[in-house]
Amino acid sequence: MAVYTDITEGDLGAFLRNYSIGELLSYKGIAEGTENSNFLLHTSTGPFILTLYEKRVEEADLPFFLGLMDHLAARGISCPLPVHRHDGGTIGTLAGRPAAIITFLEGMWPRRPTVVHCREVGKVLAAMHLAGADFAMTRKNALAVEGWQELWAASRERADEVAAGLTQEVDADFALLEKEWPDHLPKGIIHADLFPDNVFFLGSELSGLIDFYFACNDLLAYDLATCLNAWCFEKDMSFNITKGAALLSGYQSVRVLSDAEKAALPVLARGSALRFMLTRLYDWLHGPDGDLVVKRDPAEYIRKLRFHRSISSVQEYGLS
Ligand SMILES: Nc1ncnc2c1ncn2[C@@H]1O[C@H](COP(=O)(O)OP(=O)(O)OP(=O)(O)O)[C@@H](O)[C@H]1O
Ligand SMILES: N[C@@H](CCO)C(=O)O
């Protein structure tokens, strides 16, 4: 994560008096990530992550996100657990932002995802979809087609400054997606942001998932399409069909896709690429700058979108 909101030692000390996690030894801001402000805390009982929730996270959604982590962990999906305060709650206020402490997850996210990583991610994604089936709370996807339209309305005028011809390309994507977006496919809890930096490994073993702050109820296959985008392209933006095949077969070793889900993958992958291009474009044009804020380049997703527009069959993703 980034650091948008800074904290003082005094405020942090007062905040920590609500918890039984020992004495604070040190804390520092984590530069990685884009959405919230994160700090690594070391206390006399071990490491913890402190998160201050920023613009894209609604305070009213926090019980859903934190409750989901508890639910999934209880069903064998490794993820951080929210730490409870003396009053039983998990959400407090620090430096004027809603804030929570979660347990520290060991592992490293893969800087260069391999075929083995892709297969493991496919498996855990499907396991998460099954484990989420009996989660009692629901949350609408704020970044579904309507949310994309708002981002586009706020960025469209300056889109061609970022890439020549982008306005026309994206207008055409919207025309197609509004017509062809499927709504009859299996739905459930999705992670909605399962990028390599949100999946930790110890060696080749997956050690857990983090960052559930986009999780919501939506099409399960849309989550898989997001992983195709995030895990299976090479640095030169070519699609690696072997990684695609590993991701899809890993997924199907746990949850089999219906024929309708398979057929919808190209449109879902195109929609997912558009979603990430748009949040990046919006932040590129409007987001704050700062030493501990890393902006993500929309160009990567402009190229992925072009790939999905060229697909003529789902076999091109590695589906056998
Ligand atoms: N529970 C955890 N255990 C260990 N490290 C963590 C944990 N949660 C977050 N981190 C660290 O913080 C970094 C950013 O976290 P996270 O991905 O949740 O941030 P974010 O701002 O939501 O980022 P993005 O949405 O861009 O992926 C991670 O890469 C990791 O280094
Ligand atoms: N994973 C996102 C950032 C968080 O939404 C991206 O790479 O654009």
Image (cartoon, grey):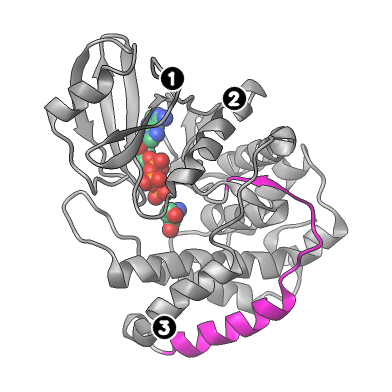
Q: Secondary structure at mark 2?
A: helix
Looking at the image, residue 198 lies above or below residue 276: above
Q: Amino acid at mark 1?
A: His
What segment carries the magenta color? 165-191
Q: Residue at x 43, y 44 (%)?
A: 59
Q: Amino acid at mark 3?
A: Arg
Q: Which residue is mark 1?
A: 84
Q: Where on the image, by quarter, is ligand 1?
A: top left
Q: Is residue 77 left or right of residue 51?
A: right
Q: Which residue is mark 3?
A: 156
Q: Amino acid at mark 2?
A: Ala
- The image quarter in which residue 71 lies: top right
Residue 147 covered by magenta stretch: no
Q: Residue at x 62, y 72 (%)?
A: 308
Please state the total of marks drawn on the protein image.
3
* Proximity of marks 1 and 2: CB atoms separated by less than 8 Å: no
Task: From the top left corner, tell me how far across and down residue 170 is, in percent.
Answer: 52, 82
Depth check: give the residue in front, 168 or 214.
214
Q: Is residue 319 left or right of residue 152?
A: right
Q: Which mark is residue 25?
A: none
Q: Quadrant of the C terminus?
A: bottom right
Q: Nearer the viewer, mark 1 or mark 3?
A: 1
Q: Residue at x 72, y 63 (%)?
A: 265
Depth check: give the residue in front, 69 or 263.
69
Q: Which residue is mark 2?
A: 73
Task: From the top left corner, tell me how far across and down residue 47 is, in percent.
Answer: 32, 19
Mark 3 vs 2, N-terminal side? 2
Task: From the top left corner, tell me how far across and down residue 213 is, in percent.
Answer: 48, 45
Q: What separation in Å lies between label 3 and label 2 (alpha carbons)?
A: 41 Å
